[in-house]
Image (cartoon, grey):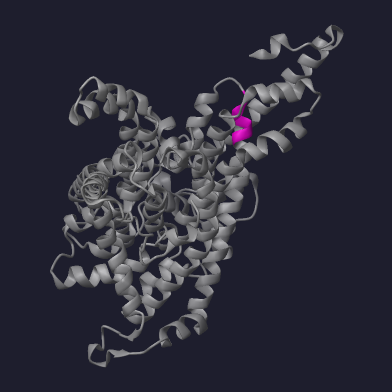
Amino acid sequence: MSNPTTAVSVSGERPPTAAPASAPRPVARRNRAREWATRAPLLPALIFLIVVTQLPFVATLVISLFDWNSFRPDRRAFAGLDNYKTVLSDDALRESIVTTVLLTASVVIVSVVLGLLLALLLDRKFRGRGLVRTMLIAPFLLVPVASALLWKHALYNPEYGLFNGVLNWLGGPQPEWLTDTPLIAVEASLIWQWTPFMMLILLAGLQSRPLDMIEAARLDGAGNWQIFRFLTLPHLRRYLELGTLLGSIYIVQNFDAVFTMTRGGLDTANLPYTIYETFYNAHEYGLASAAGVVVVIGTIIIATFALRVVSSLFREEASRA
Amino acid sequence: MTAVSTPVPITSVPEATRRAKRRGAALGVLAWFIGIVFVLPVLWMLLTSFHSEADAATNPPSLAAPLTLDGYKDFFGVGGGASPWPALLNSVGTSLFSTCFVLVLALPAAFALSIRPVRKWTDVMFFFLSTKMLPVVAGLLPVFLFARDINFLDNVWLLVILYTSMNLPIAVWMMQSFLADIPVSIIEAAQMDGARLPTILWRVVAPIAGPGIAATSLICFIFSWNEMLFAQVLTGVVAQTAPAFLTTFVTSQGLFLAKVCAASMVISLPVLAAGFAAQDKLVQGLSLGAVK
């Protein structure tokens, strides 16, 4: 893999795969036929994906250049980059960019660190390890909307939620979680959901460690910390990176938690929620599209970075081609 | 374990092992504690779903309150209220059909990317992954407008198409890695013996890659089942799926905690059951097959 950035190009271009046709004719024709035979199984999936995911994005790009509110269809007009200016200068929209970054970064970082600690714990042998693992992945398996409702109503509710119920038992204060610390409340629920995912990936990484090397290091007198720092952590690197990449892709797009728990109120509106509002309730199509393009640009920045990493996963495998 | 063969000075063995044992036990207890903390909200939801509305909404919480099925009866509309069955059936249908379509499209593609790789196959793989990085909100509006213009809104097939495109890249990635596990030599040997492609696929490829394909299907099913943004924007009454249904009845009828918990349990049950049953496969799949 020479240049991972080409792969992220949202317009869906991909490097040309055609072979140079300089060989003698009959051979060339046979080669071409064989090339097509190997390529053909790929085409349905490729064409389908380009039509269903890339074309709408191109349309979004076009719409983002128009002043278009569906309540005033007669006033639809080409607006150039005005929508982008609005997105970047409008306080609410700019704030939702900041919120998206905060939400994504905090959830990913905390859940990766917690997931690593949990994976290290679960890598040890102890009684009931399988059961503990099963308990740990339950949050990840709950339907996201259900888990958002659970946190909002059964846990955070100031009147009868579990948190305040326990605090009441202990004689503590009764905070209004979702209004006092709304963003942290949303983040906590997402961290609860994503930590198990990180734990599972990292646990798989730990269990694929070459044990003989660790044994050798131990014989040479290496301590636990040294083994962790110089053997385990480097081995886990790609698993950590993979978890971060996948977590980022999904959490940047999070809609369910914000929509269900706060309806974007109190500075918790992230970009996906804001875009949903802008087009679904405010009917500002041009503006919503521009905001959508901004999300994509942000994601490309993360992804270019992250894809370089994934490409290292490939390096060993690529020899097969 | 190799611990037996480790040459340690004999005198220090009892003391050291005792300390290691105590530490190991402590860490085991810690793991148990964290596991319980993580599962507690789910158990709380389960318990609340079996309480009456009055018992569900008390502070401090009533642990010993009598159990009842009222929450579940309410959810299924036994005592009036909207029936969840259409939404549940829509969810089953969209998830199943989109999973089938994904398999039909992804299997040949994965074959072309692993068993007989096309040139520059890594580039194609990256293209597939890059479509996953295109946030869905960025293409939602044109899809909405187009579907509205051709009268395709509130139609389950629209969701089927979109869920197929949502899961296809993941499926291609996963299956590529599962198929790449098959040693080329086995396939070549079968070819030497005169086996044709269908035979090879059925006799050689399917048995080895079968579990992986099952895992892929499971993950596609779960993602479709969980999806909410498309369902929220593109469906109304007819094509509404279970997650969208779940949010509407909370807002339209005020809050009935036991009923909400019962509903959440019912809707999560298929995913919970499948996920617990196939934990290992799930990790392998979710990490795009890179983790083995």
Q: Nearer the viewer, residue B278 or A19?
A: A19
Of residue B206 and residue A280, the one placed in the foreground of this image is: B206
Q: Splitting the image into 4 quarters, where does residue A107 fall?
A: bottom right
Would you say residue B195 is visible in this rendering? yes
Which residue is more in the foreground, B81 or A211? A211
Mark count: 0
Q: Which residue appears farthest toward the right when viewing the image?
A: B11
Q: Can the viewer see residue A176? A: no
Residue in front for this viewpoint, B23 or B128: B128
- Report the quarter where the C terminus of chain A lies: top left
Q: Residue at x 53, y 29 (%)?
A: A132
Position of residue B161 measured from the top left corner of the image (x, y, whole percent): 22, 55
Q: Is residue A120 magenta?
A: yes
x and y percentages locating residue B208 in the rendered image? 33, 25
Among the 4 quarters of the image, the one containing residue B137: bottom left
Q: Is residue A106 above or below residue B34?
A: below
What percent of the width, then of the height, locates residue B173? 38, 44
Residue positioned 29% across, 91% down in the render: A77
Residue B257 x %, y %: 38, 50
Specify whether B47 is left or right of A179. Answer: left
Horizontal side, residue A123 vs residue B230: left or right:
right
Magenta stretch bounds: A119-124
Task: Name the outermost residue toward the left.
Answer: B151
Examine the residues drawn in magenta and state their main secondary structure. helix
Instruction: Tell me: residue B284, above or below residue A124.
Output: below
> As drawn, which residue projects farthest toward the top?
B10
Q: Is residue A87 magenta?
A: no
Quarter location, residue B283: top left
The structure residue drawn at horizontal position 33% and vertical position 69%, both measured from the top left corner, is: A57
